[in-house]
Amino acid sequence: MSLTGLIQGVNSFHSNYFNDHRELFERLSGGQSPDVLFITCSDSRIDPCLITQAQPGELFVMRNVGNIIPSYGAASSAESAGIEYAVQALGIKDIIVCGHSHCGAMKGLLQIGTLAEQMPAVYDWLKRHGEATRRVVQDNYAGIEPEKLLKIAIEQNILTQIENLETYPAIRSKLHAGKLNLHAWMYEIETGTVFAFNAEKHRFMLMEKRSFPVPDPLITHIAS
């Protein structure tokens, strides 16, 4: 969509949706109280509120390239601050890490050497925070065709971020007290389907009526 189209959309939003939900927005002006932190990729093809049908104020959303959460102590100020605020200030009850099919970041991770010259910032981000995923895929899934290998990398990356979340003291405390659940989701763009990781089955399964909270500690082996 062009900038002109976006401006038209803003005007349409204010004239239609906003006016129809004015009471909601007036209420939201007094503060937010979402129950869910939704961590996902910056990719334009995934819209957390669209795929969950969440209303304004219901999701606290964090996005970056590859839906990556650096482990505690290695985190940039943005990721660590967002997580800390969600858990401590908002009292988030569920954290969802949602990757997606055809993820460009994971394609880049599988061919990391080609990024250094053309996109040095992307290379640095993936090299520093995606190496665990890359090594698991490289060392344990040799000989698998590229399309399936990409799917495994996407899924493994989601689980790596769950493990990284578990290194945060505030999250460890909430998990120990049973006040927080972590969920690993994968959104398939071409079908509009969401899969959730089932630790008992060691695989992502179609999510219909419920998610599968990830146990602590997470077992990250994916059945190939």
Image (cartoon, rainbow, N blue to C red):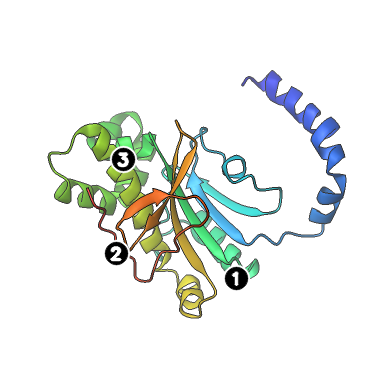
Which mark is drawn over residue 88? Answer: 1
Q: Position of residue 61 (x, y in %)?
A: 58, 51
Q: Is residue 129 visible?
A: no
Q: Earlier in the sequence, mark 1 or mark 3?
A: 1
Residue bearing the label numbered 3:
151
Q: Nearer the viewer, residue 91 or 212?
A: 212
Q: Position of residue 107 (x, y in %)?
A: 31, 35
x 12%, y 39%: residue: 143
Q: Is residue 12 above or below residue 151?
A: above
- Find the distance from the CA under tag 2 to the CA under tag 1: 26 Å
Occupied quadrant, residue 5: top right
- Find the distance from the CA under tag 1 to the CA under tag 3: 34 Å
The local crowd at label 3, few if under 14, some if 14 to 19, many if 20 or more residues have their Cα within 10 Å, is some
Q: Are the two marked residues, 2 and 1, in contact with CB atoms closer than 8 angstroms? A: no
- In what quadrant of the picture does the N terminus appear? top right
Disc 1 residue type (three-letter):
Gln
Q: Position of residue 106 (x, y in %)?
A: 33, 40
x 29%, y 44%: residue: 153
Q: Nearer the viewer, residue 133 or 147?
A: 147
The local crowd at label 2, few if under 14, some if 14 to 19, many if 20 or more residues have their Cα within 10 Å, is few
Residue bearing the label numbered 2:
219
Disc 3 residue type (three-letter):
Lys
